Image (cartoon, grey):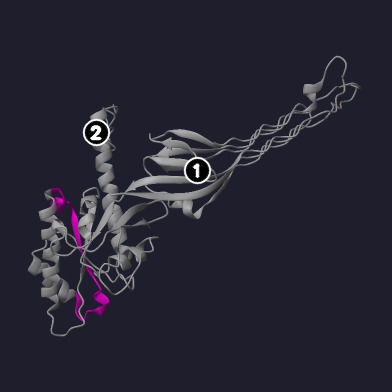
Amino acid sequence: MKFVDEATIEVIAGKGGNGVASFRREKFIPFGGPDGGDGGRGGSVYAVADRNINTLVDYRYARMHRARNGENGRGSDQYGASGTDITLRVPVGTMIFDAETGQQLYDLRKDGEQVTLAQGGHGGMGNLHFKSSVNRAPRQFTHGKEGEQRKLRLELKVLADVGLLGMPNAGKSTFITKVSNAKPRIADYPFTTLHPNLGVVRASAAHSFVIADIPGLIEGASEGAGLGHLFLRHLTRTRLLLHILDVSTLDPDVDVVEKAVTEARAIVEELRLYSEELYEKPRWLILNKLDMVDNPEELKANIIETLQWQGPVFSISALTGAGTHELVLKIQDWLDQQRLTEQEAQDRAAGTYVHSDPRFDDSRS
């Protein structure tokens, strides 16, 4: 499931320090000559691809990135210190565009690949550079150059880590609104979601993942009924499916357990009919709208027993947010473990895997 995650930022490189006009002043040395040092180089702004980062969510909040200016030169042939560079870490696959012209500048495809976003300004020259046989006491010096300043658009074609399944009005859009930055349309009629909604979920300051809400499925979706069938093929690209089940009812004559189980089985059957790969994908059961249920634990136990469900089950209220934070943390832990396992497999295949357990360290005597 490919979507575009993007952010617009401004990068400002540091200004170079000014050179200085100075003369040596020491006792018994009446004609010491020029000793003005150069200004330091301004700091530059770089971007580097990092395989441990998955989204551009950080750059939607931190839009301004400014490197330090270089220091001015000083007397006694002292050069100013260079400004500190800054490096922006972005996901592998990030494309960088000039926000004003739309021109693509860079495409970071490899882990560790680095590019210069804004070059720091050169430092000015001190008067010691202007000394000559005919100008032994120069007073000339130059100012430092301004650093580059750019407005950039970062774009990442991301793969959704988590896909939401469920009948129309199961609460998928409310859930993605509660846990992420997505703002889908929400109403009390079927097929409110007409196209996939993508959200970035921040589990902690250093961890985030991408979640996708697709149009609700109905019976016959695998054969073209409803809207969800248009996007079933995209779910095969996700790592985890969250099967959101509405366990509430406003009709006292409706058996809630029977209703929930019937809807759950219908969704599972559509997955099986569409793709065996999709049917076998890891899937968690999410019981939603428990704020509208009198005996949530009893209802949960009855649904699990009737469905003979063997996988993880979570109880939440997408409307109030109850249980959603705990669910997000569990998802992040699961995804981190999956990525670690995949990376270990890649390292083993490349012959670069190093086991972190000291019991496997052959270098110890």
**Which image quarter: residue 166?**
bottom left
**Which image quarter: residue 319?**
bottom left
Which of 239 and 27 lies nearest the eye of the viewer?
A: 239
Residue drawn 10% across and 55% down?
273
Disc 1 element: loop
Residue drawn 37% across and 43% down?
52
Which of 282 and 214 lies nearest the eye of the viewer?
A: 214
Q: Badge 2: how crowded within 10 Å, few (<14), some, or many (20+)?
A: few
Which of 214 and 72 lies nearest the eye of the viewer?
A: 214
Q: Which amino acid does label 2 sit on?
A: Phe
Query: N-terminal of the two: label 1 or label 2?
Result: 1
Give the x, y percent position of residue 71: 69, 37
Using the image, determine if residue 220 lies above or below residue 255: above
The residue where tag 1 is placed is: 102
Q: Badge 1: how crowded within 10 Å, few (<14), some, or many (20+)?
A: few
Residue range of the region highlighted in magenta in the rendering? 277-296
Give the x, y percent position of residue 223: 13, 57
Q: Quick check: can you spot residue 357?
A: no
Question: Magenta segment: does it hold 105?
Answer: no
In-image side of 177 versus 234 (left or right): right
Q: Quick check: can you spot residue 30?
A: yes
